[in-house]
Image: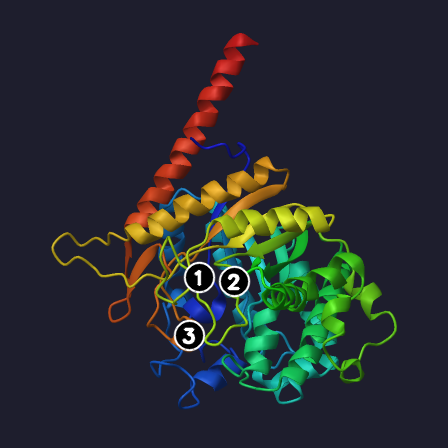
């Protein structure tokens, strides 16, 4: 039985480059992901996001699809290069018009729009000038954030500055798996600082517009489990947590980087200016948490692997719902948190369309969803102020360097025809939300009768 509050936010999520397509239409400029995907060998299946789910042309159909799930919120991102093709200078009105029409459709269906400013798609023109290694990009980002808030701040439920800056830093600049494809861990650390600085500057710039919408950031996080109780495993697990979760949380909530992480790097290579932490440590109206799995640490060779009692996803990630409870309770104990939203949680499954029934029985995804909602309730019962949950993702889409080979969606997309089909998990989610709402309606009726 649902124990979530009556006003809980139920949603699904997407991002611009993964679904929009229309890569060169109506004045959109190229982003680093356009460049990256068109570089041979970068994407597993050789694909690009040029068409993706064609959401740019099918947004009305997709809003109907969102509404059919009975959610009350939708999280999406703006393509910076669609509204400002070079990341500075002139605005592209056709790009803003697209998002304005999307907002109109969502609001008409009583679906709260939750907007993300940056989901990894930096305008290529800014990358050519240094990208996130340049402090100038932090100012360009703040200017962009202010313009979006000025135009849309009164029509959206929230604005997040960044989605998963860890990915931009580590995967984009440390390992080269993601755009822009750099592989220098030292540079990645400087990028992480500039991302955090841009977040703080953007919050200030948006608040200066007078917007009343809720402002925050979305971080991908995980608990870190030591494989054994050995001193080596425990020490490495503690360091991993400091270098990932605390590296982003500490500057935002405490005004400094974690000492343990700093002790393991050459601090002379990290350029921090006066007042940087003052600018980063801006108050948040909400914290978005993206959770998929835990990190499992072993110093043995070869390293021990988690048992995976509940299985693994098509990405090879362990299903570990207890980790969501552990993560949130740990954050609640360590930091003074604003309201929390689970802004992403989901699983890739090798879904197959049943040609006889026309449906998709993705019971593994349904089980994942059910277990993680139970884990979320457990965290809330221990005092964590969680206000909403967004499943990742609404529909199958371009899964970054995995291309179209991995499916996270509640909705199946036939990329050849762009036909959308709600999967079994989507039907389950709709029924769960319906039962939740019915339960509260019954309670309210009973209370009114006894009042």
Q: Is residue 234 above or below residue 121?
A: above
User: If you read the primary sequence from the N terminus, does the residue marked by circle 1 or circle 3 appear first?
Assistant: 3
- Tell me the CA gap for discs 1 and 3: 41 Å
**Residue found at the far front of this picture:** 230
Q: Secondary structure at mark 2?
A: loop
Quadrant in the picture for residue 383: top right
User: If you read the primary sequence from the N terminus, does the residue marked by circle 2 or circle 1 appear first?
Assistant: 2
Q: Quadrant of the N terminus?
A: top left
Q: Which residue position is annotated with label 2?
A: 227
**Residue at 59% in and 76% down:** 170
Q: Are marks 1 and 3 in contact (CB under 8 Å)?
A: no
Coordinates of residue 210 in the picture (x, y in percent): 76, 54
Q: Are marks 3 and 2 in contact (CB under 8 Å)?
A: no
Q: Secondary structure at mark 3?
A: loop
User: If you read the primary sequence from the N terminus, does the residue marked by circle 3 or circle 2 appear first?
Assistant: 3
Q: Which residue position is annotated with label 1?
A: 306
Is residue 110 visible in the rendered image? The answer is no
Which of the pair 277/18 is nearer the observer?
277
Q: Is residue 114 above or below residue 44?
A: above
**Residue at 65% in and 66% down:** 235
Q: Residues within 10 Å of mark 2 (few under 14, many from 20)?
A: some
In the displayed structure, does residue 337 sit left or right of residue 346? right
Numbered mark located on residue 177 in the image: none
Mark 3 or mark 2, whichever is nearer to me: 2
- Tell me the CA gap for discs 2 and 1: 8 Å
**Residue found at the far left of this picture:** 356
Q: Is residue 66 above or below residue 244?
A: above
Coordinates of residue 225 in the picture (x, y in percent): 55, 59
Which of the pair 126/408 is nearer the observer?
408
Q: Are marks 2 and 1 in contact (CB under 8 Å)?
A: yes
**Residue at 37% in and 62% down:** 313
């Amino acid at each position: 039985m649902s124990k979530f509050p009556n006003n809980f936010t139920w949603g699904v999520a997407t991002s611009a480059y993964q679904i929009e397509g229309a890569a060169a239409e109506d004045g959109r400029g190229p982003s680093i992901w356009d460049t990256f995907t068109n570089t041979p060998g970068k994407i597993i299946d050789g694909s690009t996001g040029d068409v993706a789910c064609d959401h740019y042309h099918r947004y009305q159909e997709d809003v109907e699809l969102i509404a059919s799930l009975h959610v009350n919120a939708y999280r999406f991102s703006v393509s910076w290069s669609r509204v400002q093709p070079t990341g500075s200078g002139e605005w592209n009105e056709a790009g803003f018009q697209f998002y304005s029409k999307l907002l109109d459709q969502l609001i008409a269906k009583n679906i709260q729009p939750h907007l993300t400013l940056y989901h990894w798609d930096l305008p290529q023109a800014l990358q050519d000038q240094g990208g996130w290694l340049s402090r100038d990009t932090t100012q360009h980002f703040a200017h962009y954030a202010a313009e979006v808030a000025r135009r849309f701040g009164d029509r959206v439920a929230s604005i997040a500055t960044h989605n998963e800056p860890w990915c931009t830093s580590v995967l984009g600049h440390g390992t080269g798996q993601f755009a822009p494809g750099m592989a220098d861990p030292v540079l990645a650390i400087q990028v992480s600082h500039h991302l955090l600085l841009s977040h703080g500057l953007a919050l200030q710039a948006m608040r200066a517009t007078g917007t009343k919408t809720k402002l925050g950031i979305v971080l991908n996080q995980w608990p870190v489990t030591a494989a054994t109780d050995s001193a080596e495993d425990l020490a490495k697990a503690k360091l991993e947590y400091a270098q990932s979760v605390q590296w982003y949380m500490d500057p935002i909530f405490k005004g400094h980087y974690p000492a343990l992480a700093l002790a393991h790097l050459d601090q002379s290579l990290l350029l921090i200016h006066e007042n940087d932490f003052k600018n980063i440590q801006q108050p948040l109206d909400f914290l978005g948490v993206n959770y998929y799995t835990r990190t499992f640490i072993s110093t043995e060779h070869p390293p021990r692997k988690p048992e995976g009692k509940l299985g693994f996803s098509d990405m090879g990630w362990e299903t570990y719902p207890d980790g969501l409870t552990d993560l949130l309770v740990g954050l609640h104990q360590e930091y003074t948190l604003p309201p929390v939203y689970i802004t992403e949680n989901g699983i890739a499954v090798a879904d197959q369309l049943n040609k006889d029934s026309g449906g998709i029985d993705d019971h593994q995804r349904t089980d994942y969803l059910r277990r993680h909602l139970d884990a979320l309730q457990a965290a809330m019962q221990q005092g964590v102020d969680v206000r909403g949950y967004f499943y990742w993702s609404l529909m199958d889409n371009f899964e970054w360097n995995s291309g179209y080979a991995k499916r996270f969606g509640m909705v199946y997309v036939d990329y050849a025809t762009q036909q959308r089909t709600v999967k079994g998990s989507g039907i389950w989610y709709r029924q769960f939300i319906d039962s939740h709402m019915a339960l509260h309606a019954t309670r309210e009726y009973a209370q009114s009768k006894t009042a």
